[in-house]
Image (tube, rainbow, N blue to C red):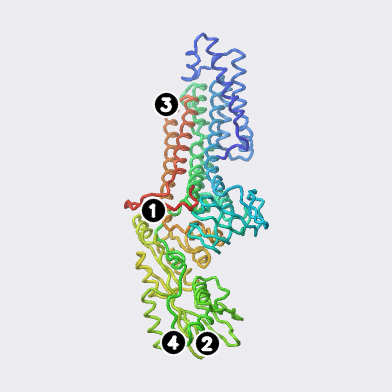
């Protein structure tokens, strides 16, 4: 059920006031307010004074004004919904002279519409409040050296601004001066809107406008995600499309069959049919799922987990296997050169390797360039550089073709020697990645690089196993020996190494066929094809990559691996709440249907029960907004609380 286009606040207030006036007048005319209270006990259809009639009429008109239009379109399109049920029930109650009950139905149904509008609105406001993480003003540094406070939206790209210790960063940018504990940020590091500056003042150059910041893009994508409905939402909608016309047919049967077949009283069975229409209205059922989904999306965003739709809220609860990329996912993705072994000078080898990797953004390439820069070696980019996916690069240096690649590529070229093989195997057995540099005639040398695992990785793997996910697999393009060393350090037993991008896709495809629900966790760019082939993809570190936000179905915005067990727990909790709400809503309907047949239910009791059910399912769904940043897995292992720079507020 979607809220009415306008919130019925004013009309609802006057509808309730008119109902109260009518009750008060009834009590005054009869000489006792207890007489008015008897109206709540059943129906009588007695004649009433004109002022009371007018007051009830106003309550009916004001309460039903937002429902009648939708009911008309529902009938016109031959797709009966709850609005049509309510209009039929109110019209029938008026027809038999039950103005009090007709007014009560109109008022309480309008109240339920307002309740839905408020509950969904509150969940969406929780998402919108993420924007408060980015300050509305910026301390802009002018060319004269002066500093002025200006609105964040007025700052153009390339402007310089100052962030004092303890303040939140208002815009995405690059640090020009100073250092601070913003993810241990130093000069030249990228920082993002909404993160907290640590103990040092920093000067930043803006790289994006406020409307284009990573945080703004996240908010936009979460809002879009609300339109991607979960399977539970789709099921409820399909159920309501079948359920509502069946209720109308059943109500007609209740009205017609007993008087015709069993000689029952027409007015009595007509009233029971109206009660059935009211109690059968699936308000609580229809409202429960969207409120749960939006609340779950908002809670996830607060935890720094971007989920692109309700369907991806549900899937983690059903996971059977997770495939992990190695570099940048289980490891920091910041390798450093540890050994340079060659027949040339170190400077010459690094100069050639740097020339081939000068325009690459691969972590290994950046490590080689960083080592060359640190050694004071000037690097000029090679010409005619060609990338060999999963193997290496080829380029022209001073008129001669050189190549850089893995040990496997060396073997493909037929230039492998026993000495090179033994050196490579020794380094790889220590968990190092080895690249070889050479030309058509000889090997220039080897460069070994070492990466370190993320400190949270072993605990995360243990928590995932404790949550019931037994199949955890590492997929890496690195050599088998290095892959096994890293896997052993984090606690993964299954490793598939030396994979080209297309091999990763094939591996994920095989996992999906074997286990069904499989997630692929990667850095969002190089692993995009494999992530697309998985049941859903999870990107690491999306705060540092626009491509990761675009590629993944779920993105861990702050590189926090510990959010993976939290995500699975959150998904299971969301599904549990949705199931509770559905069972409760249908259970209330079933009980009142039995009471209706037995003649013990009134119109007022039916609508009050429906409103009460709506209140309870909304309250249950809103519990998801109180999701905590630290939770416990099935074995009781505690997920470490995220640091202060996470998107959680």
Left or right: 498 as drawn, with respect to 360: left
Lateral position of residue 71 relative to residue 611, left or right: right
Which comes sooner in the sequence, label 3 or label 4? 4
Q: Single out the residue that lies furthest toward the left.
A: 635
C-alpha distance separating marks 3 and 4: 89 Å
- Cα distance, mark 1 to mark 3? 56 Å
Check disc 3 and report the residue beneath it.
Answer: 598
CA neighbours of label 1 inside 10 A, class few (<14), some (14 to 19), many (20+): some
In front here: 350 or 494? 350
Disc nearest the viewer among 3 and 4: 4
Q: Residue furthest top?
A: 31
- Dots 2 and 1: beta carbons under 8 Å? no
Residue at position x 37%, y 71% in the image? 484
Q: Are marks 2 and 4 in contact (CB under 8 Å)?
A: no
Residue at 43 percent across and 34 percent down: it is 588
Along the line of sight, which residue is nearer the eye, 35 or 86?
35
Looking at the image, can residue 642 be seen?
yes
Crowd rating for badge 2 (residues with CA inside 10 Å; few <14, some 14–19, many 20+)? some
Q: CA distance from mark 2 to mark 4?
A: 13 Å
Residue ranking furthest to the bottom: 441
Give the mark toward the camera: 2 or 3: 2
Residue at the extreme front of the image, as rendered: 145
Q: CA distance from mark 1 to mark 4?
A: 47 Å
> Which residue lies under the disc numbered 1?
640
Name the residue beneath numbered marker 2: 439
Q: Which residue is mark 4?
A: 416
Query: Which mark sits nearer the N-terminus, 2 or 1?
Result: 2
Dot in front, 1 or 4: 1
Q: Nearer the viewer, residue 281 or 326?
A: 326
Determine the CA span between mark 2 and mark 3.
92 Å
């Amino acid at each position: 059920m979607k809220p009415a286009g306008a919130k019925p606040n004013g009309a609802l207030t006057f509808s309730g006031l008119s109902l109260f006036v009518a009750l008060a007048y009834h009590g005054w005319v009869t000489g006792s307010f207890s007489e008015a209270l008897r109206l709540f006990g059943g129906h009588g259809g007695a004649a009433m004074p004109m002022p009371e009639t007018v007051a009830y009429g106003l309550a009916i008109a004001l309460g039903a004004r937002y429902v009648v239009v939708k009911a008309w379109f529902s009938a016109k399109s031959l797709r009966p919904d709850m609005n049509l049920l309510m209009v039929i029930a109110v019209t029938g109650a008026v027809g038999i002279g039950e103005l009090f009950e007709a007014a009560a139905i109109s008022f309480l149904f309008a109240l339920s519409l307002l309740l839905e509008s408020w509950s969904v609105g509150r969940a969406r406001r929780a998402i919108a409040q993420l924007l408060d993480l980015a300050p509305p003003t910026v301390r802009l540094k002018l060319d004269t050296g002066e500093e002025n406070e200006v609105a964040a939206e007025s700052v153009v790209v390339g402007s310089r601004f100052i962030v004092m210790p303890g303040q939140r960063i208002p815009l995405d940018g690059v640090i020009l001066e100073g250092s601070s504990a913003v993810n241990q940020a130093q000069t030249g590091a990228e920082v993002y809107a909404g993160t907290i500056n640590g103990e040092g003042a920093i000067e930043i150059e803006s790289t994006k406008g406020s409307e284009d910041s990573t945080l703004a893009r996240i908010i936009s994508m979460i809002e879009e995600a609300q339109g991607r409905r979960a399977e539970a939402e789709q099921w409820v909608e399909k159920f309501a499309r079948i359920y509502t016309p069946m209720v109308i047919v059943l109500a007609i049967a209740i009205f017609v069959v007993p008087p015709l077949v069993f000689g029952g009283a027409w007015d009595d069975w007509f009233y029971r049919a109206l009660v059935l229409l009211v109690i059968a209205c699936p308000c609580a059922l229809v409202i429960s799922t969207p409120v749960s989904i939006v609340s779950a999306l908002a809670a996830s965003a607060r935890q720094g987990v971007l989920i692109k739709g309700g369907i991806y809220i549900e899937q983690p609860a059903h996971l059977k296997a997770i495939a992990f990329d190695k570099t940048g996912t289980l490891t920091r993705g910041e390798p450093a050169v540890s050994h340079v072994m060659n027949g040339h000078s170190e400077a010459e080898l690094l100069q050639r390797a740097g020339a081939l990797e000068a325009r690459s953004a691969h972590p290994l390439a950046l490590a080689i360039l960083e080592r060359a820069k640190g050694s004071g070696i000037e690097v000029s980019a090679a010409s005619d550089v060609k990338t060999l996916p999963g193997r290496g690069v080829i380029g022209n240096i001073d008129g001669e073709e050189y190549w850089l690649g893995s040990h496997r590529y060396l073997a493909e070229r037929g230039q492998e020697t026993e000495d090179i093989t033994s050196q490579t195997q020794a380094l790889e057995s220590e968990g190092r990645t080895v690249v070889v540099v050479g030309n058509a005639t000889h090997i220039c040398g080897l460069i070994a690089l070492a990466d370190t695992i993320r400190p949270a990785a072993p605990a995360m793997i243990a928590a995932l196993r404790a949550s019931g996910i037994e199949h955890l697999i590492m997929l890496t393009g690195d050599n088998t020996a290095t892959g096994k060393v890293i896997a052993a350090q984090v606690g993964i037993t299954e490793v598939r190494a030396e994979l080209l991008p297309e091999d990763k896709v094939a591996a994920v495809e095989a996992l999906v066929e074997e286990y069904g629900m499989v997630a692929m966790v990667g850095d969002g760019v190089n692993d995009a094809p494999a992530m697309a082939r998985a049941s859903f993809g999870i990107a690491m570190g999306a705060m540092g990559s626009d491509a990761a936000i675009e590629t993944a179905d779920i993105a861990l915005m702050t590189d926090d691996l510990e959010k993976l067990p939290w995500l699975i727990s959150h998904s299971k909790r969301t599904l549990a709440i949705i199931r509770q709400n559905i069972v409760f809503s249908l259970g209330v309907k079933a009980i009142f249907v039995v009471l209706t047949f037995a003649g013990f239910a009134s119109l007022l009791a039916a609508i009050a029960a429906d409103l009460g059910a709506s209140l309870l399912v909304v309250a249950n769904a809103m519990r998801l907004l109180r999701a905590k940043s630290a939770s416990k897995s099935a074995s009781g292992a505690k997920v470490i609380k995220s640091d202060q720079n996470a998107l959680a507020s």
